[in-house]
Amino acid sequence: MKLPQTSSIAKSASQNHWKWLQRTQPFSWLQNLFNITDSEAMLNAQTLNYLKYQMKLDMPLSFVCQSRMHDEAQYYEQIIFSQGIVPTRPNSWHDFYNGVIWLQFPKTKRLLNRWHVEDIEQFGMSPRNKRRNQITHFDECGVILVCEDEQLLSQLRQHQFKHVLHEQRHRWGSDIHGVIFGHANYEMLMNPYIGLTGKWLAIEPCVNYFSLPVAEQLNYIDETLVTKLTQQQAFSGDCHLSPLPLLGVPGWYAQNNEAAFYDNQDYFRPKSTKLLQPTTGKS
Protein backbone atom coordinates (compact mmCIF):
# COMPACT_ATOMS: atom_id res chain seq x y z
CA MET A 1 0.00 0.00 0.00
CA LYS A 2 1.48 3.34 -1.07
CA LEU A 3 0.63 6.22 1.24
CA PRO A 4 1.91 9.79 1.50
CA GLN A 5 5.01 10.21 3.62
CA THR A 6 4.54 11.37 7.19
CA SER A 7 5.57 14.98 7.76
CA SER A 8 7.47 15.76 10.94
CA ILE A 9 6.70 19.49 10.86
CA ALA A 10 3.75 19.38 13.24
CA LYS A 11 4.23 15.85 14.58
CA SER A 12 5.47 16.93 17.99
CA ALA A 13 2.88 19.63 18.63
CA SER A 14 1.95 19.62 22.29
CA GLN A 15 -1.43 19.96 23.91
CA ASN A 16 -0.47 23.46 25.07
CA HIS A 17 0.36 24.31 21.48
CA TRP A 18 -3.11 23.21 20.40
CA LYS A 19 -4.75 25.23 23.20
CA TRP A 20 -2.97 28.28 21.85
CA LEU A 21 -3.81 27.51 18.22
CA GLN A 22 -7.50 26.89 18.82
CA ARG A 23 -7.99 30.50 19.87
CA THR A 24 -7.02 31.76 16.42
CA GLN A 25 -8.38 31.27 12.93
CA PRO A 26 -8.47 29.08 11.01
CA PHE A 27 -8.06 26.59 13.88
CA SER A 28 -10.90 28.05 15.95
CA TRP A 29 -13.18 27.03 13.05
CA LEU A 30 -12.19 23.39 13.65
CA GLN A 31 -12.42 23.78 17.41
CA ASN A 32 -15.96 25.15 17.23
CA LEU A 33 -16.99 22.47 14.77
CA PHE A 34 -15.41 19.41 16.36
CA ASN A 35 -14.80 20.47 19.99
CA ILE A 36 -11.26 19.15 20.00
CA THR A 37 -10.10 19.03 23.61
CA ASP A 38 -7.17 16.63 23.82
CA SER A 39 -4.64 16.94 21.01
CA GLU A 40 -2.53 14.06 22.28
CA ALA A 41 -5.28 11.47 22.12
CA MET A 42 -7.21 12.51 19.03
CA LEU A 43 -4.75 11.69 16.25
CA ASN A 44 -6.21 8.39 15.11
CA ALA A 45 -8.89 6.79 12.95
CA GLN A 46 -11.11 6.04 15.95
CA THR A 47 -11.47 9.74 16.75
CA LEU A 48 -12.36 10.57 13.16
CA ASN A 49 -15.01 7.85 13.09
CA TYR A 50 -16.43 9.20 16.34
CA LEU A 51 -16.57 12.72 14.91
CA LYS A 52 -18.35 11.37 11.84
CA TYR A 53 -20.92 9.71 14.11
CA GLN A 54 -21.27 12.84 16.21
CA MET A 55 -21.93 14.98 13.12
CA LYS A 56 -24.53 12.46 11.89
CA LEU A 57 -22.92 12.41 8.46
CA ASP A 58 -24.35 10.24 5.72
CA MET A 59 -20.88 9.47 4.40
CA PRO A 60 -20.28 5.92 3.08
CA LEU A 61 -16.67 5.94 4.22
CA SER A 62 -14.89 5.10 7.43
CA PHE A 63 -11.37 5.70 8.70
CA VAL A 64 -9.07 2.75 9.35
CA CYS A 65 -5.77 2.77 11.17
CA GLN A 66 -3.01 2.08 8.68
CA SER A 67 -1.04 0.00 11.17
CA ARG A 68 -3.91 -2.51 11.32
CA MET A 69 -4.11 -2.94 7.56
CA HIS A 70 -2.48 -5.77 5.67
CA ASP A 71 -0.16 -5.07 2.78
CA GLU A 72 -2.20 -3.75 -0.10
CA ALA A 73 -1.47 -3.93 -3.80
CA GLN A 74 -3.72 -0.98 -4.42
CA TYR A 75 -2.71 2.65 -4.30
CA TYR A 76 -4.05 4.96 -1.57
CA GLU A 77 -6.75 6.54 -3.77
CA GLN A 78 -7.83 3.14 -5.07
CA ILE A 79 -8.27 1.82 -1.53
CA ILE A 80 -10.58 4.70 -0.69
CA PHE A 81 -12.59 4.25 -3.88
CA SER A 82 -12.97 0.47 -3.92
CA GLN A 83 -13.05 -0.36 -0.20
CA GLY A 84 -14.77 2.72 1.24
CA ILE A 85 -12.06 3.30 3.83
CA VAL A 86 -9.53 6.07 4.37
CA PRO A 87 -6.18 4.69 5.62
CA THR A 88 -5.11 6.90 8.52
CA ARG A 89 -1.73 6.91 10.20
CA PRO A 90 -1.79 7.24 14.01
CA ASN A 91 -0.15 10.29 15.56
CA SER A 92 -0.16 12.12 12.24
CA TRP A 93 -1.47 15.68 12.12
CA HIS A 94 -1.39 15.48 8.32
CA ASP A 95 -3.76 12.51 8.26
CA PHE A 96 -5.95 13.95 11.01
CA TYR A 97 -6.44 17.17 9.05
CA ASN A 98 -7.16 15.13 5.93
CA GLY A 99 -9.83 13.35 7.93
CA VAL A 100 -11.55 16.50 9.15
CA ILE A 101 -11.58 17.84 5.58
CA TRP A 102 -13.36 14.62 4.57
CA LEU A 103 -15.87 15.27 7.34
CA GLN A 104 -16.50 18.84 6.18
CA PHE A 105 -16.55 18.30 2.41
CA PRO A 106 -17.33 14.61 1.78
CA LYS A 107 -18.93 15.11 -1.65
CA THR A 108 -16.06 17.14 -3.02
CA LYS A 109 -13.47 14.75 -1.63
CA ARG A 110 -15.28 11.79 -3.19
CA LEU A 111 -15.38 13.58 -6.54
CA LEU A 112 -11.64 14.23 -6.45
CA ASN A 113 -11.02 10.65 -5.38
CA ARG A 114 -13.10 9.35 -8.32
CA TRP A 115 -11.15 11.50 -10.75
CA HIS A 116 -7.89 10.17 -9.34
CA VAL A 117 -9.01 6.58 -9.88
CA GLU A 118 -10.33 7.26 -13.38
CA ASP A 119 -6.96 8.68 -14.37
CA ILE A 120 -5.03 5.83 -12.74
CA GLU A 121 -7.09 3.33 -14.74
CA GLN A 122 -6.57 5.27 -17.98
CA PHE A 123 -2.96 6.45 -17.66
CA GLY A 124 -1.43 4.19 -15.02
CA MET A 125 -0.13 4.84 -11.56
CA SER A 126 3.10 6.64 -12.37
CA PRO A 127 3.95 9.20 -13.41
CA ARG A 128 0.91 11.24 -12.47
CA ASN A 129 -0.82 12.92 -15.36
CA LYS A 130 -1.53 16.67 -15.34
CA ARG A 131 -5.04 16.40 -13.89
CA ARG A 132 -3.91 14.24 -10.98
CA ASN A 133 -1.10 16.67 -10.20
CA GLN A 134 -3.55 19.56 -10.18
CA ILE A 135 -6.07 17.67 -8.04
CA THR A 136 -3.33 16.81 -5.55
CA HIS A 137 -2.17 20.42 -5.37
CA PHE A 138 -5.70 21.63 -4.63
CA ASP A 139 -6.31 18.79 -2.17
CA GLU A 140 -3.18 19.76 -0.24
CA CYS A 141 -3.14 23.57 -0.58
CA GLY A 142 -6.63 24.68 -1.64
CA VAL A 143 -8.60 27.52 -0.03
CA ILE A 144 -12.27 28.24 -0.77
CA LEU A 145 -13.28 31.90 -0.92
CA VAL A 146 -17.01 32.45 -0.56
CA CYS A 147 -17.49 35.86 -2.15
CA GLU A 148 -19.76 37.50 -4.72
CA ASP A 149 -17.70 40.67 -5.20
CA GLU A 150 -16.03 39.99 -8.54
CA GLN A 151 -14.09 43.24 -8.35
CA LEU A 152 -12.50 42.17 -5.09
CA LEU A 153 -11.69 38.73 -6.52
CA SER A 154 -10.22 40.33 -9.63
CA GLN A 155 -8.00 42.50 -7.44
CA LEU A 156 -6.86 39.38 -5.62
CA ARG A 157 -6.06 37.69 -8.95
CA GLN A 158 -3.96 40.74 -9.78
CA HIS A 159 -2.04 40.25 -6.51
CA GLN A 160 -3.33 43.46 -4.94
CA PHE A 161 -2.78 41.76 -1.62
CA LYS A 162 -2.37 44.84 0.57
CA HIS A 163 -5.64 46.28 -0.66
CA VAL A 164 -7.70 43.09 -0.44
CA LEU A 165 -6.20 41.62 2.72
CA HIS A 166 -5.41 44.74 4.75
CA GLU A 167 -7.35 47.74 3.50
CA GLN A 168 -10.47 45.60 3.03
CA ARG A 169 -9.87 43.43 6.10
CA HIS A 170 -13.16 44.62 7.67
CA ARG A 171 -15.01 42.73 4.94
CA TRP A 172 -13.48 39.35 5.78
CA GLY A 173 -16.10 37.38 7.65
CA SER A 174 -19.00 39.51 6.44
CA ASP A 175 -18.55 39.77 2.65
CA ILE A 176 -15.82 37.23 2.06
CA HIS A 177 -15.25 33.95 3.88
CA GLY A 178 -12.01 32.04 3.58
CA VAL A 179 -12.26 28.30 4.30
CA ILE A 180 -9.34 25.86 4.27
CA PHE A 181 -9.79 22.91 1.94
CA GLY A 182 -6.20 21.73 1.60
CA HIS A 183 -5.29 19.70 4.66
CA ALA A 184 -1.56 20.47 4.33
CA ASN A 185 -2.42 24.15 4.90
CA TYR A 186 -3.56 23.33 8.43
CA GLU A 187 -0.42 21.36 9.14
CA MET A 188 1.87 24.12 7.86
CA LEU A 189 -0.05 26.80 9.78
CA MET A 190 0.77 25.04 13.04
CA ASN A 191 4.31 26.34 12.60
CA PRO A 192 3.81 29.28 10.22
CA TYR A 193 6.59 30.76 8.14
CA ILE A 194 6.86 33.60 5.64
CA GLY A 195 6.27 32.08 2.25
CA LEU A 196 3.34 29.85 3.25
CA THR A 197 0.89 30.10 0.37
CA GLY A 198 -2.33 28.38 -0.66
CA LYS A 199 -4.24 28.40 -3.94
CA TRP A 200 -7.77 29.75 -3.94
CA LEU A 201 -10.99 28.99 -5.76
CA ALA A 202 -14.08 31.18 -5.35
CA ILE A 203 -17.77 30.36 -5.13
CA GLU A 204 -20.67 32.77 -4.75
CA PRO A 205 -22.56 32.76 -1.44
CA CYS A 206 -26.20 31.82 -1.25
CA VAL A 207 -28.77 34.16 0.28
CA ASN A 208 -28.01 34.75 3.97
CA TYR A 209 -24.88 32.59 3.75
CA PHE A 210 -23.03 34.63 6.36
CA SER A 211 -25.82 34.17 8.92
CA LEU A 212 -26.23 30.42 8.39
CA PRO A 213 -25.13 27.87 11.01
CA VAL A 214 -21.70 26.43 10.28
CA ALA A 215 -23.10 23.02 9.31
CA GLU A 216 -25.31 24.62 6.66
CA GLN A 217 -22.42 26.72 5.38
CA LEU A 218 -20.33 23.58 4.98
CA ASN A 219 -23.08 21.73 3.16
CA TYR A 220 -23.58 24.67 0.82
CA ILE A 221 -19.86 24.94 0.08
CA ASP A 222 -19.57 21.20 -0.52
CA GLU A 223 -22.52 20.95 -2.91
CA THR A 224 -21.64 24.17 -4.77
CA LEU A 225 -18.03 23.12 -5.13
CA VAL A 226 -18.98 19.75 -6.62
CA THR A 227 -21.29 21.46 -9.12
CA LYS A 228 -18.68 24.04 -10.10
CA LEU A 229 -15.83 21.57 -10.47
CA THR A 230 -17.99 19.19 -12.51
CA GLN A 231 -19.49 21.80 -14.82
CA GLN A 232 -16.15 23.45 -15.50
CA GLN A 233 -14.31 20.13 -15.85
CA ALA A 234 -11.85 21.61 -13.39
CA PHE A 235 -8.26 20.36 -13.43
CA SER A 236 -8.74 18.73 -16.83
CA GLY A 237 -6.71 21.34 -18.71
CA ASP A 238 -4.33 24.04 -17.66
CA CYS A 239 -5.67 25.01 -14.25
CA HIS A 240 -4.27 28.29 -12.97
CA LEU A 241 -5.44 28.83 -9.42
CA SER A 242 -4.26 32.12 -7.99
CA PRO A 243 -2.00 32.24 -4.92
CA LEU A 244 -3.17 33.34 -1.49
CA PRO A 245 -0.44 34.20 1.05
CA LEU A 246 -2.03 32.48 4.04
CA LEU A 247 -0.34 34.62 6.69
CA GLY A 248 -1.93 37.67 5.13
CA VAL A 249 -5.52 36.51 5.62
CA PRO A 250 -7.11 38.72 8.31
CA GLY A 251 -7.25 36.89 11.64
CA TRP A 252 -4.95 34.06 10.57
CA TYR A 253 -1.66 35.60 11.74
CA ALA A 254 -1.21 38.18 14.48
CA GLN A 255 1.45 40.21 12.71
CA ASN A 256 -0.77 41.01 9.74
CA ASN A 257 -2.57 43.67 11.77
CA GLU A 258 0.15 46.09 10.67
CA ALA A 259 0.06 47.56 7.16
CA ALA A 260 3.84 47.26 6.88
CA PHE A 261 3.54 43.46 7.03
CA TYR A 262 2.20 43.50 3.47
CA ASP A 263 5.18 45.45 2.13
CA ASN A 264 7.31 42.31 1.93
CA GLN A 265 7.27 41.75 -1.83
CA ASP A 266 9.21 38.52 -1.51
CA TYR A 267 6.05 37.13 0.09
CA PHE A 268 3.28 39.33 -1.29
CA ARG A 269 4.65 39.18 -4.79
CA PRO A 270 3.38 41.55 -7.48
CA LYS A 271 1.66 39.99 -10.46
CA SER A 272 4.14 38.82 -13.03
CA THR A 273 3.80 40.62 -16.34
CA LYS A 274 5.32 38.63 -19.13
CA LEU A 275 5.75 40.66 -22.29
CA LEU A 276 5.25 38.89 -25.54
CA GLN A 277 8.40 38.89 -27.62
CA PRO A 278 7.96 40.11 -31.21
CA THR A 279 8.35 37.47 -33.84
CA THR A 280 10.07 37.89 -37.19
CA GLY A 281 10.07 35.96 -40.36
CA LYS A 282 7.62 35.08 -43.07
CA SER A 283 4.18 33.82 -42.24
Image (cartoon, rainbow, N blue to C red):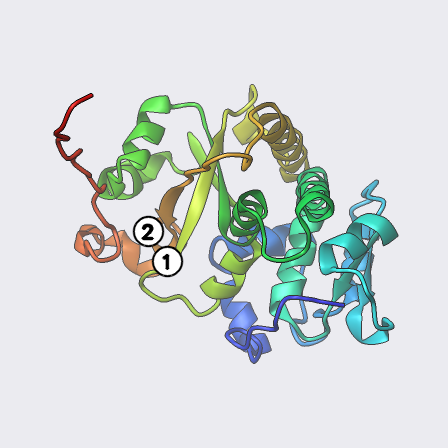
Q: Position of residue 142 (x, y in %)?
A: 50, 47
Q: Position of residue 65 (x, y in %)?
A: 80, 69
The quarter of the picture where the N terminus appears is bottom right
Cα gap from disc 2 to disc 1, whole angstroms:
7 Å
Q: Is residue 260 visible?
A: no
Residue 213: which numbered mark, if any?
A: none
Quarter location, residue 110: top right
Inspect the image, locate mark 1, and give the three-letter code of the amino acid beneath it.
Answer: Tyr
The residue depicted at 80 percent of the width and 48 percent of the height is 81
Which sits earlier in the primary sequence, circle 2 or circle 1?
Answer: 2
- Helix, strand, or loop for circle 1? loop
Q: Residue furthest front?
A: 282
Would you say the residues marked 2 and 1 are in contact, meaning their CB atoms lie under 8 Å apart?
yes
Residue at label 2? Answer: 248
Tell me if mark 1 has few (under 14), some (14-19) or many (20+) residues whose alpha carbon lies within 10 angstroms of its own: some
Residue 253: which numbered mark, if any?
A: 1
